[in-house]
Amino acid sequence: MGQEGKLHVVLLGRRNSGKSSLVNALTGQQVSIVSGTPGTTTDPVRRGYEIPGFAPVVFIDTAGVDDPGPLGEARAERSTRAIEQADVAMLVISGNRFDDVEEALVKRFREEDLPFFIIHNKRDECPLLATTRERLAAELGDVPVIDFSAARDADASPLVEALKEAGRGAVRPPASFIGDLLAPGDHVLLVTPIDSEAPAGRMILPQMQLLRDVLDNRCVATVAQPGEVEAYLRQAPRPPRLVITDSQAFARVAALVPGEVPLTSFSIALARRDGPFEEYLKGTPRAGDLRAGDRVLILESCSHHATGEDIGRHKIPAWLRQHHAGKELFFDFVAGRDPLPRPAADYALAIQCGGCMVSARQLWNRLRPLLRAGVPVSNYGMTIAYLHGIFERATCPFAGKG
């Protein structure tokens, strides 16, 4: 699922099909602006809602995919790009209309293996015809088709039940990051630098996720900054079962932790559970044989203010340039949901952040065009480990674990 375990649901369809009205009907609130004027929604709008007994949901209300003109085409493109962020799609139609526009969306859903169902909205104006239902069943199989009126139907339970059924596969307890490496009572050392990139008064999400995972597995966690690692290891009654460090401290921590103690990073642990881990393993060595003029893509799944200590925008490029002294390398940076600035095939290597703020589906969707173009992919932790000569050590804890 999406950020913080929320089910992301995208509503797509033509202008004035009633997508915003459906969001209001589903939430029971006037959260989206509704107008009879086509094109009221101009950009994807996200609205959070809790479906009792099921899951927290983020509805992504989009502009009509049939918006004309250059500006309309740009809006439509942003709407269809929202598919990459979704766990479930709701295809909204009206007036018994289902032709090339809707067929193109269905094709995209199936290419992305995205569960979806269809809402024939505005049944108070034009009910769903039996011939339309039969045609959709013949073309789409058992995809649910619900005849509804966001304006008149007070009971939205048919929509909620269809949504729950479509999203059931995505709503599941997340797997443990490191539970298969541990036994109850094991001691885990978490190394968390506090620098200008650390949020004021709190820890970053991967650190909190791994700390919780250690506790969930009935183990003991010690959290320390790199400067305290040596003293801790010297006085500890026995070596920790596992050390997990922030990737940017890899070299320093690896020099302090005995070789027989398993060592990895927060970023690699996240990639192992939610990312294309095997693709990262294959792609990471490309960081060592870049050629002059190669272009590297740095992918950040969230947007944030970058400082001089930013790991993606400053430290990784600096380490790569140091490793390839004398070679001119070029870097592109993409944050959040921004599109790639150039064709995927232009890149010699793509390096993805840990992806803590997105779902596994969203991470795969971001990397899929690159993988299809044959671009090697890595992630922050693996790239840093490779450039510091500890790639095998940092990935060894997960060897043979599937």
Image: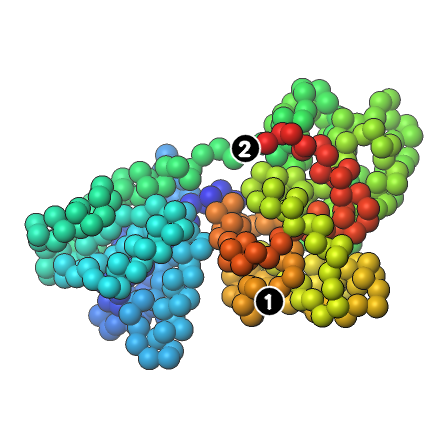
Which of 99 and 60 lies nearest the eye of the viewer? 99
Which is nearer the N-term, disc 1 or disc 2? 2
47, above or below 75, in the image: above
Q: Depth-wise, is mark 1 or mark 2 nearer the camera? A: 1
- Give the distance between the C-alpha atoms of the residues marked 1 and 2, in whole angstroms: 35 Å
Q: Residue at x 82, y 49 (%)?
A: 388
The x, y position of residue 293, in whole percent, is: 71, 70
Q: Is residue 317 left or right of residue 259?
A: left
Q: Provide the secondary structure element on which disc 1 rests.
A: helix
Look at label 2 and name its amino acid.
Ala
Quadrant where the C terminus sits is: top right
184, above or below 294, in the image: above
Residue of label 2: 175
Q: Is residue 369 visible from the viewing direction of this image?
A: yes
Q: Residue at x 42, y 59 (%)?
A: 82
The x, y position of residue 189, in whole percent, is: 77, 33
Q: Which mark is residue 43?
A: none
Q: Provide the secondary structure element on which disc 2 rests.
A: loop
Look at label 1 and name its amino acid.
Asp
Residue count near mark 2 (Cα–Cα under 10 Å), binned few <14, some 14–19, many ≥20? few
Residue of label 1: 346
Which of 155 and 40 lies nearest the eye of the viewer? 40
Q: Residue at x 73, y 34 (%)?
A: 396
197, above or below 66, in the image: above
Q: Is residue 141 left or right of residue 195?
A: left
Corner quadrant of residue 319? bottom right
Q: Residue at x 33, y 61 (%)?
A: 32
263, above or below 127, in the image: above
Q: Is residue 307 left or right of residue 216?
A: right
Residue count near mark 1 (Cα–Cα under 10 Å), binned few <14, some 14–19, many ≥20? some
Which of 339 and 93 lies nearest the eye of the viewer? 339
Q: Is residue 27 visible from the viewing direction of this image?
A: no
